[in-house]
Amino acid sequence: MKKDDVEMEFDDRILLPEENYILCPIYTLPLNEFKLKRYCKERGIVSYLPLRKTWKINNYLKRGKPYQQSQVVLRPMFPSYIFVKMPMDGGRASIMDSRSAIRILTPSSQERFIEDVRAIRSIEQVALEQEVEFNPEVRVGDRFIIESGVWAGVTGWLKKKGKHCSWTVELEIVNQSVQTAIDPSQYKMRRLEG
């Protein structure tokens, strides 16, 4: 079985309400979603990592000439989040022992949250078959703050959106502006008003 097949498996038990079990979103360290998914699978914990197809672009030199290779890869639909069904007693400790989880969030209503996860599953199925554009909260010209990753706490403006998960942004760091390209799927960003 290939790695992608393991990551793509969907366990229907995640959507079935069970007594003494709770379905929670888990906030992970950046780029640790697949690691936590494997951790849960190894321990028999039911988990769900919604995925989407996106482009990965590799730039390299061959005999001194620059080349670019692109391929379709699977990335988390919600960076730094995975959904886990765990026992109410002792489940939290087991997840936090993974060293990939930062925080376990508790939904206010299990029934409504299960319906939300069901809707996410439907969107995922469409996104894996055809190209779906996820409209992030941040739009060209918007001011934003990065809330996760190496740029956490830095504010900036979105200057241009690239074709394959690349944004050109101007970041404010110690009262200086730095223009760079970032992959928005690797950071949690929030739009700032004004």
Image: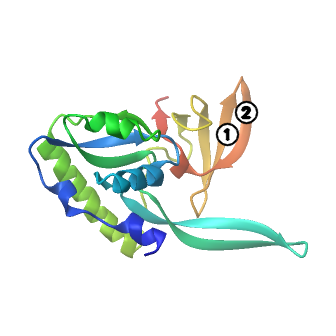
Which residue sits furthest front?
43
Work out whether residue 14 or residue 74 is closer to the camera in this orientation and state it: 14
Residue 132 can be seen, yes or no: no
At x 39% / y 46%, what residue is drawn? Answer: 81
At x 60% / y 38%, what residue is drawn? Answer: 157
Residue 93 can be seen, yes or no: yes
Q: Is residue 149 left or right of residue 3?
A: right
Q: Which residue is mark 2?
A: 177
**Residue 82 image point, x, y percent:** 36, 49
Protein image colouring: rainbow
Q: Is residue 158 left or right of residue 69?
A: left
Which residue sits furthest right?
64
Q: Which residue is mark 1?
A: 170
**Residue 30 image point, x, y percent:** 52, 43
**Residue 6 image point, x, y percent:** 40, 67
Q: Are marks 2 and 1 in contact (CB under 8 Å)?
A: yes
Tell how many labels.
2
Q: Mark 1: which amino acid? A: Glu
Graded by Cα atoms within 10 Å as few (under 14), some (14 to 19) or many (20 or more), the crowding at tag 1 reads some
At x 61% / y 35%, what residue is drawn? Answer: 151
Instruction: Find numbered disc 2 in the image and state the secondary structure of the residue it sits on.
Output: strand
